[in-house]
Image: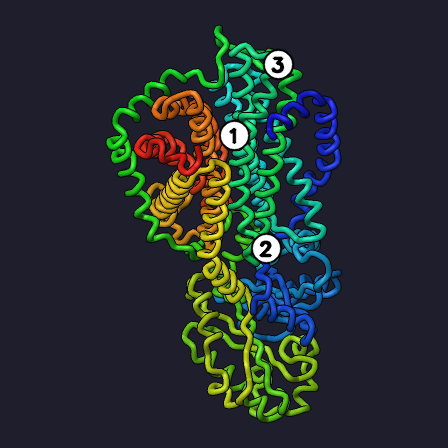
Amino acid sequence: MMRAIGTFVVRRRRWVLAAWIVLIVALAPGAGRVEKELEVVARVRGSEAQAVEMMLRTRFNSPFARFAVLVIMGAPSPETPEGLDVLEAVVAPLDTATGVSGTLSYLTAFDSLLVGAHGGTFVVAGLAPTGQLDAMVPRLRALTAPIAERLGREHPGITLRWTGDVPINYDIRASSAADARRAEQRVLPLSLLLLLLASGAVVASLLPVVAASIAIVIALGIAVAVNTMWPLSVLLQNIVSMIGLGVGIDYALLTVSRFRESLAAGASAEDAAIEAAEHAGVTILLSGFTVMIGFGALLFVSLNELQSTGVGGVIVVGISVLMAITALPAVLAMLGPRVDAGRFRRKRVASNPMEGWWRMWGRAVIARPWMVLIVGSAPVLALSWQARRLSGELPRGDWLPPGMESGVALRDLVRMERSGIVNSFRVVLEVPDSTRVTLPTGWTAVRRLSAAFARDPRVARVQSIATVLKSERPLPMFLDGLPQVVRKSLLSADERSAVVDVIPRDSVAFNALTVMARDFRRMDIAALTGLPGARVSVGGLPALNADYIDLINSRFRGIVLLVVLATMTALIIGFRSLLVPIKALALNLLSVAAAYGAVVLVLQEGHGASLLGLSEPLGGVFPAAPILVFCIVFGLSMDYEVFLVARVAEARRTMSEDDAIVEGLARTGGVITSAAAIMIAVFAAFTLGDFVFIKVLGFALATAVFVDATIVRMAIGPALLKLAGKWNWWPGR
């Protein structure tokens, strides 16, 4: 089949290349808009936190269902007349701004909570549910920038900075996109240099880089098109760039190497291109399919970030595979011997200038397989043993990029001892049909629930309609006198639900907030309120984080099983063997465990973390990191296994088992080493950015590829092939 495809591509190469050009022209404009199109809001579909947000929007019509916080520093205290004037100058334009559904400040309620413990104040601005919420952030900043400039003439040093989950998400988008651009700028020249050293020719080195770059552009363009029907996370951009550069160069390098090998053996340009499409194509198809299995499994986790990662990974790997088996053979057939243009070695080389060294190493492995197996396994097993301490919690401390405005504002709130505003819990109490919140039984339930939260030593302030009115009974005259913005925030239109805002103390660690959310959800509401049939739903940012973590933990084992079984099936079909797939899966799991162990030692516990720009150990590596690392590493690790074993299987048609292993190592050792070096450089480039999550992911992937391509595939794998002998291929021929 692959020979037929290769023949078709080569014979009709101009039409094939014209189709690729049309695809690039059609999708490139979308790729240029990717930073503006993809969303940053974390979605946990069907979660309790999301249900609370929906209730606040619909049943309450609350202006503060989603909100941003404007932090004001360097101004007089609002408790003074001068400070009130400054605050009014800030709030008045916000009250009339498009997209702002309401404001809450010291002007609304003369509450000490709205004044910083050590100076400063803040304004809570409700965000109307129109369009993408994060699109409001630049408009809000454009609104307050001239206000800060004008007030700065009388109050030098005054600052107005926005924070909260919406501005933080917006800034993470900008930081993530900037990290992706900088990583690409760093890695492309380095990749080209490594390819030049491996191939010894300029054109042969440029082709994989160009192919990977085109695959990224097309994948991002497709992602923007998909985003119109299925909202995707901005994390996709980093994943597409990272994986696209890695596998795109890998697959293109394999095709180019096989083409040059056939040319060096005396084949014509067309025949060499067909052979490259045939032999490299089979390997690339099987390898690409196993990588896509890992990404495809992420689609079964109902988190938009992980599903977006899966979509981006499947698209960019699929495009890279198609590029390597169609566009590249067409280009190579047109280039012919000119693929060696710019050669700076006197002698034309095939795919691997160090083939002799790899052949010697192959003979050494065949001669002493047990020694190679034991010596190679010991360090990898020792590193893998550390994986048992991996923590999928949110990192402790301040892990936001240092120059991010929303991060600076959040640090200002911490100094004001008011950061609990951003991390508040939105608890919705629903009373039975037989009563209302404005009736004595419902009112008592709200008062008792508010009092129960207030007794929790982790809670700084509780706000409900009962605490605002400070009344033991629901007096209509007091209720009617409430400002509408306050009433809608705390009492539903049908009076069957009430919001209890629970503000945690600043001393509560960020990770402990998710524990609080779970504790609140486990409370015996009927006993606390004295109202049988009453129930609560807990929302807010900490509750959303708890939902996020719980969903990932509940799906992790199922995803692992799905990936392993699907990969096993693909390899059994591809190699017509049982033992080779089992060995490949075991080695893949070993590579994943080694990556986990390295993350524990370096990032989680801080041994050498300063080299990656971290000032302290993370303590946790983000809830999504373990499942992402598994799915990506498991697929990428299979690349090199397929490269090697496919070549061994091809060689044993005319050679003995031992000679076939040596031949497979000799023919693929240089390609695997070169491809791995480039992939390590790609992933390592992403560890230098400010986005800590991508730093964790880049380090884990770089470590996994290094361990896998050096010790696992070049030592442990060949030793196991030797020890199994002809049983590797049972029950096939």
Upstream in the sequence, badge 2 or badge 3?
3
Which residue occupies the foreground of this view, 268 or 348? 268
Q: Which mark is residue 304?
A: 2
Point out the tag, 3 or 1, that comes first from the N-terminus: 1
Residue hosting label 1: 250
Please state, as top left, top right, bottom left or bottom right, where the N terminus lies in the image. Answer: top right
Q: CA distance from mark 2 to mark 1?
A: 28 Å
Which three-letter amino acid code belongs to the residue tagged 2? Answer: Asn
Give the structural element (helix, strand or loop) at label 1: helix
Depth-wise, is mark 2 or mark 3 nearer the camera?
Answer: 3
In the image, residue 581 lies at what x, y percent? 42, 40
Q: Residue 544 appears at what percent x and percent y?
A: 54, 64
* In this rendering, the label closer to the viewer, 3 or 1: 3
Circle 3 packing at 10 Å, graded few (<14), some (14-19), many (20+), is many
| Residue position marked by numbered label 3 in the rendering | 269
- Residues tagged 3 and 1 counted as in contact (Cβ below 8 A): no
Q: Nearer the viewer, residue 146 or 657?
A: 657
- Give yes or no for contact between labels 2 and 1 (Cβ–Cβ under 8 Å): no
**Quarter residue 90 falls in:** bottom right
Residue 474: x %, y % from top left: 62, 91
